[in-house]
Amino acid sequence: MPEIKIYTQPGCPFCRRAVALLESKNIPFTEVNAPRGTAEREEAIALSGGQTTVPQTFVDGRPLGGCDDLMRLERTGQLNGILGLS
């Protein structure tokens, strides 16, 4: 199973939607609280290649992008493969 990490911030509706999608997959993932101005947010920006928005999702260190990106991957049937699901 790949390591899945999602950087979020409190009160963000896009973060909640992305987390809900991951939860619906019944797979383990780590949610990192990354409000603006924190070291965690800076880490997400660096890992994502400069993306400053949340959520930012990573699978084995590979950036998948934000909520819209996750939803697009889900709609096109690609997300399960990336997450290591059959």
Image (cartoon, rainbow, N blue to C red):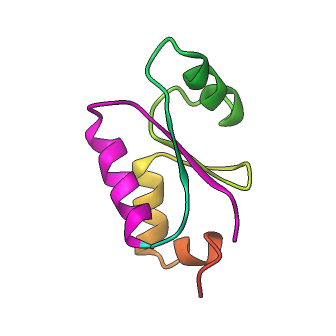
Residue at the far top in the pictured view: 37
In this orientation, which residue lies closer to the viewer: 56 or 1?
Answer: 1
Label total for image = 0
Residue 73 as seen in the image, left or right of residue 50: left
Q: Is residue 43 above or below residue 1?
A: above
Q: Is residue 15 above or below residue 28?
A: above
Q: Where, by quadrant of the figure, is residue 50 drawn?
A: top right
- Residue 83 on image: x %, y %: 61, 70
In this orientation, which residue lies closer to the viewer: 75 or 9?
Answer: 9
In this orientation, which residue lies closer to the viewer: 82 or 24?
Answer: 24
| Residue at 62% across, 27% down | 45
- Residue 47 on image: x %, y %: 70, 34
- Residue 1 on image: x %, y %: 69, 71
Magenta residues span 1-24
| Residue at 39% across, 53% down | 19
| Residue at 49% across, 79% down | 77
In this orientation, which residue lies closer to the viewer: 7 or 64?
Answer: 7
- Residue 4 on image: x %, y %: 62, 56
- 13 magenta-colored: yes
- 54 magenta-colored: no
